[in-house]
Structure formats: structure tokens, C-alpha cells
Image (cartoon, coloured by chain):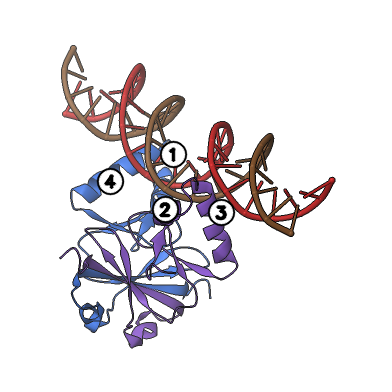
Chain colours: A blue, B purple, C red, D brown
Amino acid sequence: MSAGRPLTCEEVLRYGQQIVPSLGVATVYRNVKMLAGEGWLSEVELPGGGLRYELADLPHHHHFLCRSCDQAFDVHQCPDEVQSLAPAGFEVDSHELILFGRCAACT
Amino acid sequence: MSAGRPLTCEEVLRYGQQIVPSLGVATVYRNVKMLAGEGWLSEVELPGGGLRYELADLPHHHHFLCRSCDQAFDVHQCPDEVQSLAPAGFEVDSHELILFGRCAACT
DNA sequence: ATATGTGCAAACTCTTTGCATGGAG
DNA sequence: CTCCATGCAAAGAGTTTGCACATAT
């Protein structure tokens, strides 16, 4: 919640171990999956590694992936005409937009 | 080349085994990676499994992922104002847009 | 004969699962 | 005491690598 951006399991593990040093990987994977199953978190899949997790109740948004530090950030805007881009006969139910580049800290 | 859409290694393997039945996984992974390294193919990472590969010389485009058959298709249009969506201080060098839904065959 | 690409199987990485344990109620 | 979530370690899935062999030159 305090990160304000999608986290990988490894990032969650590192955050968590600052509070409970004995925290193990299995617990992170298990709980993050459970929270996602119960609708508290949603899974975000971006290039370059495993799933990331973010709070599920965020308003519609997209993601920015920094090529330098590999951290994901939220992008709170969305190009609207997206649904209409699909080929004829294809039904679009959702979409994801990923921007790649360098974040403010890495520039 | 004939597929006209991004393929997973597994799909390449199945295609290839129709021609050379003894074809093994290692050969597919090795060659696809080599072709990508040499710039003939580019890697496309979409949710739900491994990397997909497509011809590198295609014009700018995006992808549609069918939730039913898990096949990826090309989308030949792009919302233009994409670069401007990033937060201040973030440098965007490229982007990917993924549409999710059902392809024409699965509808 | 030499060099190259292949299939096989083992190694790796990331993720998941089984199980015994320890702390909470 | 009973339960249940945890850590650990082993098991899985997908991908990569080492190696001996076959083929082409």
C-alpha cells in the first residue's frame, strides 16, 4: 500500500524482511496470490520478469517500466479510443498500455 | 513468417515438428534467441506465459491477445498521443499496447 | 578431417506445494 | 490444547547449457 506502485514478489519480500527478517519467499507468494484471489490485489504482467502486484481498487490506469531500475510506476492517463483499434470481428474487453523509458530518478 | 502473428516457442516447436518431426525444444529456444539477437526477430512479452517472437521488420504495431485461444494477433493501429501520458520527469522511449478479448474465431 | 548445428539430458530460475513446527487464541 | 500460517526444502514448469554425435563441406 505504501509503495504506490506495482511490486514484484522479490520487492515485497525485501520490504517485508525489513519488518520480519525471517520472512520467507513461500509466504510472500502464497499471500500475494491469496490476496489477488480474494480481490484485494491485482496482477500486473510487464516484460522482464515475474508478475507484479498492485492494489485492486485503483482507478483505471497504466504502467511505466523503467529500463534502468526495472521499477514499475503508475500512469494515470489513458488514450481513449483504444477499443476501436482491434481488427474487425475481435471483441475487446480490456487493455493494457505500457510505457518504457527512464524514470525521474534514473534520468 | 507465414504465421503472420507472434508465436511462442511452443507454437514454433509444433509448426517445426510438422516439417522435421525430430525437432527438439532446445533447438527452437536456441535459434529463436539467436535470430532475436541478430535482429531478425523481436521478442514480444504478453501476459500468460513465455516470450513470443515476431518478425523484426514489421512496421510499428501492437497486439491483441485472445483470452480464449491464447493466440496473439497484430493490431496495426496506434493511439498517437502516447508519449505525453508519462509523469513529469519520465522519459518515454517506446511503448506497448495490448488489447484483451476474443478473436474473430473464438467469438 | 573439420566445423557446425542438433537432440538429449542435466542444470537453472522462478514459483508452488507438502510437511512439521511454533505461536495465537 | 487446537488451529492455522509460516519457514524450509523438495517438487514443478519453463528455459538454458554441456556434451557427444551426425551431417555437410
Separation of disc 4 and disc 2 at Cα?
38 Å
The x and y percentages for residue B24 are: 50, 46
Q: Residues within 10 Å of mark 3 (few under 14, many from 20)?
A: few
Disc 3 designates what residue?
B30
Of all chains, the one bearing label 4 is A
Q: In the shown orientation, is residue B66 left or right of residue C12?
A: left
Q: Tell me the residue that label 1 is attached to.
A: A21
Q: Please name which of the two marks, 1 or 2, marks the residue nearer to the observer.
A: 2
In the image, which is nearer the foreground, mark 4 or mark 3? Answer: 3
Residue D5 percent coordinates (x, y): 27, 35
The answer to whether the residues at label 1 and label 2 have Cβ atoms under 8 Å apart is no
* Alpha carbon separation for disc pair 3 and 2: 19 Å
Disc 1 is placed on an element classified as loop
The front one of C13 and B17 is: B17
Instruction: Determine whether label 1 and label 3 are within 8 Å by CB.
Output: no
Rendered view: C22 above or below A15: above
Mark 2 neighbour density, 10 Å: few (under 14) some (14–19) many (20 or more)? few
What amino acid does circle 3 point to? Arg
Q: Which residue appears at 37% of the width and 69% of the height? A: B5
For disc 4, the marked residue is: A33
Front: mark 1 or 4: 4
Which one is nearer the viewer's eye here, C16 or C23? C16
Closest to the camera, between mark 1 and mark 3, is: 3
Asked if residue A16 lies left or right of residue D19, the reply is left
